[in-house]
Image (spheres, rainbow, N blue to C red):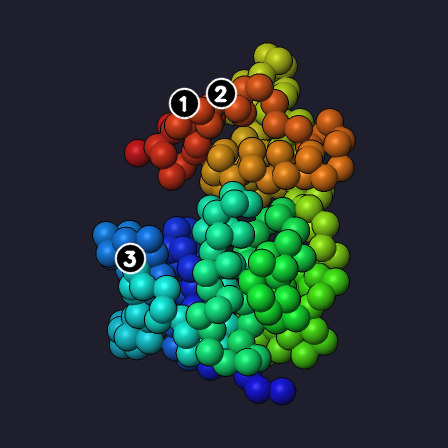
Amino acid sequence: MSPIQSVGVVGGGLMGSGIAEVSSRAGITVTLVEVSAEAAAAAQTRVEGSLRRAEKRGKIDGAEVDNVLERITFTDDLQQLAQCDLVVEAASENEQVKLDLFRKIGPILAKDDAILASNTSSIPIVKLGAVSGRAGHVMGVHFFNPAPVMQLVELIPSLTTSADTKARMTNFIGDQLGKQAIEATDRAGFVVNSLLVPYLMSAIRMYEAGYASAEDIDRGMVLGCGHPMGPLALCDLIGLDTIRAIGASMYDEFKEQLYSPPPLLDRMVEAGLVGKKSGQGFYPYA
């Protein structure tokens, strides 16, 4: 079983840049592809900022920061993914966007055993595999934010994923990246979001109905249940647009009301109040 030596990442937002950083810190060559040269430059700034913060905390030294950055190529050209052993799609949580990317990337990959994975939280992996032209080499690999810090990764093989692909991805996550993997079936939400999303939606409905302030809802769960972060602050961190997309996808599949985005969530997303990345969600951010 050959190890992963080169990784492509499509999308340089919080998740994509984090996955690129984690892979490069493991000594792997990385190609990060964004939609434009400007977005690629922004992704580079994001990765370097994360590394410099880690340096200040004593987690990594300056020489290694430089080495990590040297192993990452930032580009807007999908063709540069051709020789990758693994490509991880980390674009926005939009089914059509992801399907279009899998249609484009599948034929680009030159190696017969190259793996094409999605960091989706909720979109069926089997659909992505079907349009890629290489269904046996497609699976889900769901990192958690922030990827350089969070130890869990969900691995999601579909009905068509080969045993070799699954074994190589298990080795990549555990032995090469040093993270902990759990396996989930190819159903919307997988393990973590199937439990987390109803909790977050319930907190939003509670706030929407005027039960309590955002601060008191969050304080209740932090101090009363020992959670490291309250549900509304967590929504802001994840991104309200992402939360809505995951909930809508899960509701479409299961038709259970507990997954359905509340009206307040819809309005906030439509207004661009999507959390920390926009500067305003349930809380303001500098």
Asked if residue 51 lies left or right of residue 4, the reply is left
Mark 1 — residue? 271
Asked if residue 146 lies left or right of residue 71, the reply is right
**Are the two marked residues, 3 and 1, in contact with CB atoms closer than 8 angstroms?**
no
**Are the two marked residues, 2 and 1, in contact with CB atoms closer than 8 angstroms?**
yes
Residue 46 in view: no
Amino acid bearing label 2:
Arg
Crowdedness of circle 1 by 10 Å Cα count: few (<14), some, many (20+)? few
Say which mark, if any, is on residue 267: 2
* Pick the front one: 52 or 170: 170
Say which mark, if any, is on residue 40: 3
Disc 3 is placed on an element classified as: helix
Disc 2 is placed on an element classified as: helix
Residue 252 in view: yes
- Distance of mark 2 from mark 1, alpha carbons? 6 Å
- Distance of mark 3 from mark 2, alpha carbons? 30 Å
* Spot occupied by residue 235 in the image (x, y as percentages of width and height): 53, 35
Amino acid bearing label 3:
Ala
Say which mark, if any, is on residue 195: none
Answer with mark 3 or mark 1, whichever residue precedes in sequence: 3
* Spot occupied by residue 120 in the image (x, y as percentages of width and height): 57, 52
Residue farthest bottom in this picture: 1
Disc 1 is placed on an element classified as: loop
